[in-house]
Amino acid sequence: MSEAPVHPVKLAGVHHAAYRCKDAKETVEWYGKVLGMDYTTAFAEDHVPSTGDYDPYMHVFLDAGNGNILAFFELPNQKDMGRDENTPAWVQHLAFKLGSEEELLAAKKHVESLGIEVLGPTHHGIFKSIYFFDPNGHRVELATDIGTDEQYAELKRVAPMMLDEWSQTKKAPRHADWLHEIARKEHAGS
């Protein structure tokens, strides 16, 4: 008797992404004011449900649009929140999608009007982004897609080759140099 073939998991999407915060109330208010996210749910326990450990927490959930949920944990009994000092601050970030370049520029103006320093827009060839930090030190990116179907198809086509080359050399593969050339031309014209 043969076993049924094992099939990979079929995901239905991201349920939520969770990060740590310094202050749950401040975080909820900041994401509401800066990014318009609705605060939807909170869980608070003295014991962690999955482990049973005593570690009081407040777990807050924010609606990031289109069925996407961003969550934060405040952990008052843990050491002060830090970040991975071996990873540059620009690497770990939360990226949210906007519908157009006009929306991106309006968002930049809004965020700056709140006294928050914004970097960008940065042209990435197939999308443009702005960057800033939340009160917890998490880098936030707002991005809008500007690429063509052909560009996205080409990037998907060369992705396996790029990964293989990177794995062997740890040097940037050149299969998608055209992408960076698009961005460089726009930056030169600004």
Image (spheres, rainbow, N blue to C red):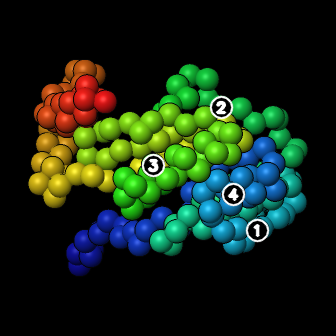
Q: Is residue 60 left or right of residue 132?
A: right
Quadrant in which the N terminus appears: bottom left
Could you tell me which residue is drawn at 69 percent across and 72 percent down? 40
The amino acid pointed to by label 2 is Arg
Residue holding disc 3: 105
Residue holding disc 2: 83
* Disc with the residue nearer the chain's start (2 vs 3): 2
Whole-percent x and y of residue 73? Answer: 73, 53
Q: Secondary structure at mark 2?
A: loop
Q: CA distance from mark 3 to mark 4?
A: 17 Å
Whole-percent x and y of residue 25? Answer: 81, 56
Q: CA distance from mark 1 to mark 4?
A: 18 Å
Crowd around label 1: few <14 · some 14–19 · many ≥20 (10 Å): some
Quadrant in which the C terminus appears: top left
Tally of marks? 4
The amino acid pointed to by label 3 is Leu
* Disc with the residue nearer the chain's start (1 vs 2): 1
Could you tell me which residue is drawn at 19 percent across and 36 percent down? 182
* Disc with the residue nearer the chain's start (3 vs 4): 4
